[in-house]
Amino acid sequence: MPNLKVKLGKLELQNPVMPAAGTFGYGEEYASLIDLDKLGAIVTKGISLAPQAGNPPPRIWETWGGMLNSIGLQNVGLEIFVKEKLPFLCRWRMPIIVNFFGYSSKEYAECAQRLSDLEGVAALEANLSCPNIKKGGLQFGSNPQTVAKITNIIRKSTKLPLIVKLSSNVSDIKEVAMAAEGEGVDAISLINSIPAMAIDLERRRPALGGITGGLSGPAIKPIALKAVWEVAPRVKVPIIGVGGIMDYRDALEFLVVGATAVQVGTANFTNPRTMLEIIEGMGAFLKQRGIEDIKEMIGSLGL
């Protein structure tokens, strides 16, 4: 069997496949359907200091080639996460990456510091790019100076491997990624969902309660691939490719353009076994071609 191990800074994964934050909850619903220990890691739903109610319903709308969501970062808050969700996740051996966010740099820092004190948390992923909230989120990740400032504050608050999740909805994703790298991140996730809208024609109303939402799924894969391809040669830290990955061939395409690992989101809703099938498919693809180590695929795009 080919070697599928990859590293995100100090964090070693048995394979490069993990769920995208917000699409896998805290793992509870999927634990009866798949063996979580076969994943490279688990990425939790985004956590904030206080519980968040999220946006009004409807929150999900299926579109051609994808899915539109306006969840609004609903979550149980840090206290409940520590008491109820983290102990459940710690039953498994896979690394736990906690996605988190705040509405100010101070909240980001406090959340990072408190999460870092918890046994079982292997790494943190700071969400600087959610398109579904009115304050923070994409607002924080829209320019290099703001990303550098917040990343610097977070970096000083944790010694855990730090990942930042960025959006392609910026003027120059390369500059934003380099700003984050300059402040000491260990990896960069590219991309988040893309701001979008759908209309319920019968009611002549926005389809989503939050009016606009984030588009994910196959429709955004070409955009995500381009973002990874643009950023990969400009940074030295690993990139986690996210956006429209539905099978192992999609996942390997992200590695070829420069990603070290991948996150799977929308596909989990249509087939809970997607990530396991991607891992199996990657191994079979490499074996058939006599490739002994998946790292040979990373950045192997010929031009």
Image (spheres, rainbow, N blue to C red):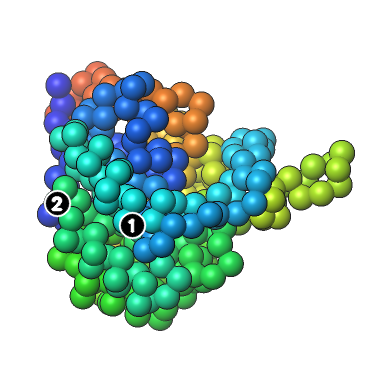
Question: Which residue lies at the image location 22% right of the left edge and 54% below the top edge?
Answer: 123
Asked if 239 appears above or below 17 in the picture, the reply is below
Q: Name the kind of residue labelled 1 in the image.
A: Leu
Asked if 79 appears above or below 225 in the picture, the reply is below
Decide if residue 283 is in sight here: yes
Asked if 139 appears above or below 124 in the picture, the reply is below
Residue 276: name its quadrant.
top left
Dot label at residue 190:
none
Name the foreground residue: 270 vs 75.
75
* Residue 193 percent coordinates (x, y): 52, 51
Rounded to the nearest whole Å, what is the CA distance between mark 1 and mark 2?
14 Å
* Residue 266 percent coordinates (x, y): 49, 37
Residue 6 relative to residue 265: left or right = left
Residue at mark 1: 78
Decide if residue 263 is in sight here: no
Q: Residues within 10 Å of mark 1 (few under 14, many from 20)?
A: many
Question: Which residue lies at the image location 66% right of the left edge and 46% below the top edge?
Answer: 57
Q: Residues within 10 Å of mark 2 (few under 14, many from 20)?
A: few
Question: Which residue lies at the image location 49% right of the left edge and 70% below the top edge?
Answer: 136
* Residue 132 percent coordinates (x, y): 57, 58
Residue at mark 2: 119
Name the foreground residue: 81 vs 143.
81
